[in-house]
């Protein structure tokens, strides 16, 4: 399998998001999130906010998409999954 897209640095990933129309209030926080969570993991959370130009498969964001909202959605989903999959407040006693 041949990959045609070059790998991008964290700065290049952030620049690409901004170029596509995402609003980034704090670049330092955004870089931290991209380096620790991962661009492709976060992509699943911003996909509903994308518009695709079918002529050349260029992705742009709908108006007023904020990076911190994407992180909020990611964190909400993460916490919900942890509560549902690992309910620490429930203790099962086997008799």
Image (tube, rainbow, N blue to C red):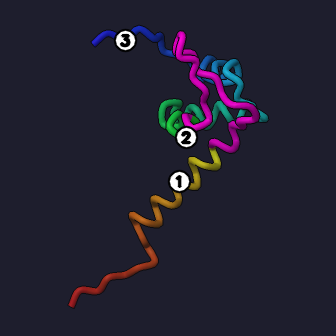
Quadrant where the image shows the N terminus: top left
x and y percentages locating residue 5 in the rendered image: 45, 11
Query: Mark 2–mark 3 contact, CB under 8 Å?
Result: no
Of residues 94 and 17, the one drawn nearer to the viewer in this rendering: 17
The residue singled out by tag 1 in the image is 77
Q: Quadrant of the C terminus?
A: bottom left
Q: How much space separates mark 2 and mark 1, taking CA atoms? A: 9 Å
Q: Residues within 10 Å of mark 2 (few under 14, many from 20)?
A: some
Residue bearing the label numbered 2: 45
In this picture, residue 67 sits left or right of residue 73 = right
Q: Which residues are magenta?
A: 47-70
Circles 2 and 1: CB distance less than 8 Å? yes
Q: Nearer the viewer, residue 70 or 59?
A: 59
Q: Upstream in the sequence, badge 2 or badge 3?
A: 3
Residue lying at 55% horizontally and 34% vertically, measured from the top left: 47
The residue that label 3 is drawn on is 3
- Specify few, some or many for label 1: CA neighbours under 10 Å numbering under 14, 14-19, or 20 or more: few
The tag earlier along the polypeptide, 3 or 1, is 3
Find residue 92 and name its label. none
Give the SS element for disc 3.
loop
């Amino acid at each position: 399998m041949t990959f045609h897209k070059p790998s991008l640095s964290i700065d290049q990933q952030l620049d690409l998001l901004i170029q596509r129309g995402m609003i980034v209030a704090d670049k330092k926080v955004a870089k931290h999130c991209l380096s620790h969570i991962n661009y492709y993991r976060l992509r699943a959370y911003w996909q509903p906010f994308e518009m695709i130009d079918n002529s050349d498969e260029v992705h742009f964001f709908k108006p007023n998409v904020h990076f911190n909202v994407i992180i909020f959605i990611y964190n909400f989903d993460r916490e919900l999954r942890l509560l549902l999959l690992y309910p620490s407040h429930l203790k099962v006693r086997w008799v």
